[in-house]
Amino acid sequence: MTKTALITGATSGIGRATAHEFAKHGIKLILCGRRQERLDTIEQALSKQTDVFTLNFDVRNKQTVFDAIASLPENFKQIDILINNAGNAHGLDPIQTGDIEDWDAMMDINVKGLLYVSKAIIPQMTQRQSGQIINIGSSAGKEVYPKGGVYCASKHAVLAITEGMRIDLNPFGIKVGAINPGLVETEFSQVRFKGDAIADHVYKGYKALQPEDIADIIYFAITRPAHVNIADLLVFCTAQASSTIVKKEL
């Protein structure tokens, strides 16, 4: 039977790459994002390979999340795979000069948004006693680095929520895991540094992970046998040894 996957943050980076990877294998897609024009573009591209439905909402808005998922047509209502990918980072400031709006955005999207989407979907999985949830965390969820305390806190929370989900959903046979990338070359740095010139140099001098690398790993995780669950996976590019150690060529 063809499975259906819902992917948040599907309009760019890891989310978009995962949508393309899933489409290649005929998985039905529910693609979620804030930018309708990008959703339209990806739907047009992937509908040649599989059935696609798009939902335009911001994971920060609780009611919108529930309304959007409740509005799914009958042939998309059963969600077998949830990829909680929507996330963000804002600023790189020490705690004493951090922007509270940046903090709110990171907690609202990375933590509360993940919870809202999960809450809207988990009941159908528990009812069927089947399903798989993959939360996209970060190496920042395993190691705190200077000027990244709040972002790291949000990603530590993702790992704690993932572990809690896995424990609570264990009686229902639902797989829950986290994929935690290090440096991935996406729009991430443009958002974090708000278009500052520093964003152009984040990935210079080494080969960072590409969104397709993580999409490939996510597909691997969802295609394991029924008795195998990838519970927690940390992924670095070869040049990266930790959050603060990256071998760069001059």
Image: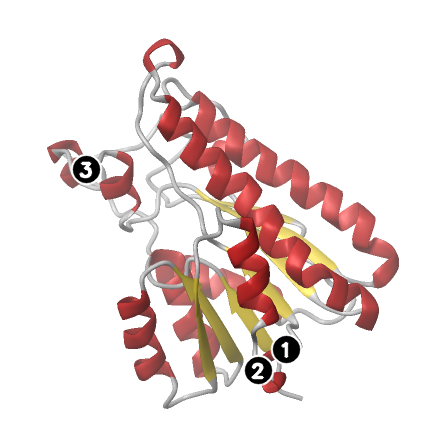
Residue 130 appearing in the image: yes
Left/right of residue 117 with respect to residue 203 in the rendered view: right
Crowd band around label 3 with a 10 angstrom C-alpha radius: few (<14), some (14–19), many (20+) = some
Query: Are there few (<14), some (14-19), or many (20+) residues within 10 Å of tag 2?
Result: few
Q: Please state the horizontal and vertical placement of residue 204, each as a whole percent of the image.
A: 17, 40
Give the mark, 3 or 1, whose residue is nearer the N terminus: 1
Residue bearing the label numbered 1: 77
Mark 2 highlights which residue?
Answer: 73
Task: Single out the mark in the foreground, 3 or 1.
Answer: 1
- Please state which amino acid type lies under the numbered disc 3: Ala
Place residue 43 in its image quadrant.
bottom left
> Of label 3 and label 2, which has the lower sequence position?
2
Amino acid carrying label 2: it is Pro
User: Which residue is the extreme one toward the top?
Assistant: 96
Residues under numbered marks 2 and 1 in contact, where contact means CB atoms less than 8 Å apart: yes
Residue located at (57% from left, 82% from top): 73
- In the image, is 6 to the left or to the right of 23? right
Q: Crowding near pointer 1: few (<14 within 10 Å), some, many (20+)? A: some
**Residue indicated by mark 3:** 199
SS state under label 3: helix
149 and 52: which is toward the camera: 52
Q: In the drawing, does residue 196 fall left or right of residue 23?
A: left
| Distance of label 2 from label 1 (alpha carbons) | 6 Å
**Element at label 1:** loop
SS for dot 2: loop
